[in-house]
Amino acid sequence: MTMLICPDCRNENEIERIYCHDCGTKLDRSKLKKDKALVEAEKPEETQKRIRRMFGGRSDIYKYTFLKVAKILLGACAAAGLLLLISPPTDMPEKKKSSELPRQINLDLENATMAHHGTQLRYTEQDVNAYLASALRNKQAALDKPLLHFERVILKMDEGRCQITAERSLFGYSLYTTGIFQVSTVDGKIVASICGGDIGRLPIHPEIMKYGDVIFSDLWKALDRERKLVAKLAAIEFHPQSVLLTATVQ
């Protein structure tokens, strides 16, 4: 059959069409060959199929538009998710070098575990973060991984729990992983369980974060001595911006 060629998209259209069923451009019908014999020779079945294709073309346009919009939305969601992944937490403090010597928390813990009387140690958030920066600086090689350079760790305290954020860099770009830990004393033993977290600013479901403790495995290994000393204590209580450690009475 004679077909009308769209001047814009070069799509072939049926001779009955005025507008292209693919792009909607008005067709130039002056170039249509008026071959009445060819049209009259068309069988009724072929005419019906051609008409169905003609009217079905609009639904194809709707499907194409829907798929195009869906791809755009999916790409926008993926871009937003990636932006959240690489963004620093909103409350992440700036890096500062302090000239003051940090409190020797590890020595305090050793003395408390060996004392024959109950001892309580109270530290502020600033005290703990200053000690962590000093202690982990000497273990940089153990914390670095291929392509990932360890930068720092920041601990934030709240009632009954603490939040640990580790900053690592990839090709100079900082990446942040955060774990929220619930701390309690069960049968005389201090138990910490991960109950949530984030990657960058993207929240991770608590059920998924239960398996995310492996993210901090290198950090736990570097602080193995401190963890063992804390495990010997009778209790640990987290409060907003402070922590209270209680040693067992010998």
Image: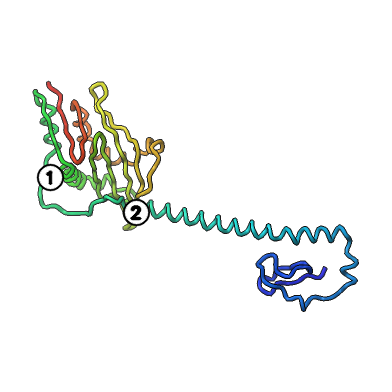
Displayed quadrant of residue 159: top left
Q: Is residue 126 above or below residue 35?
A: above
Taking depth in this image into account, of 42 and 137 the one nearest to the observer is 42
Q: CA distance from mark 2 to mark 1?
A: 29 Å
Label 2: few (<14), some (14–19) or many (≥20) C-alpha neighbours in 10 Å: some
Displayed quadrant of residue 26: bottom right
Residue 102 is labelled as 1
Left or right for 99, reference 207: left
Number of numbered labels in the structure image: 2
Chain-order first, disc 2 or disc 1: 2
Of the two numbered discs 2 and 1 in the rendering, the one whose residue sits closer to the viewer = 2
Left or right for 99, reference 2: left
Left or right for 111, reference 9: left
**Residue at 73%, 58% in the rendered image:** 56
Residue 111 is labelled as none
Look at the numbered disc 2 and give the secondary structure of its residue: loop
How is the protein colored in the picture?
Answer: rainbow
Look at the numbered disc 1 and give the secondary structure of its residue: loop
Task: Report which residue position mark 2 lands on.
Answer: 87
Displayed quadrant of residue 66: bottom right
Q: Is residue 181 above or below residue 235?
A: below
Contact, mark 2 vs mark 1 (Cβ under 8 Å): no
Q: On the rendered image, what quadrant is the C terminus found in?
A: top left
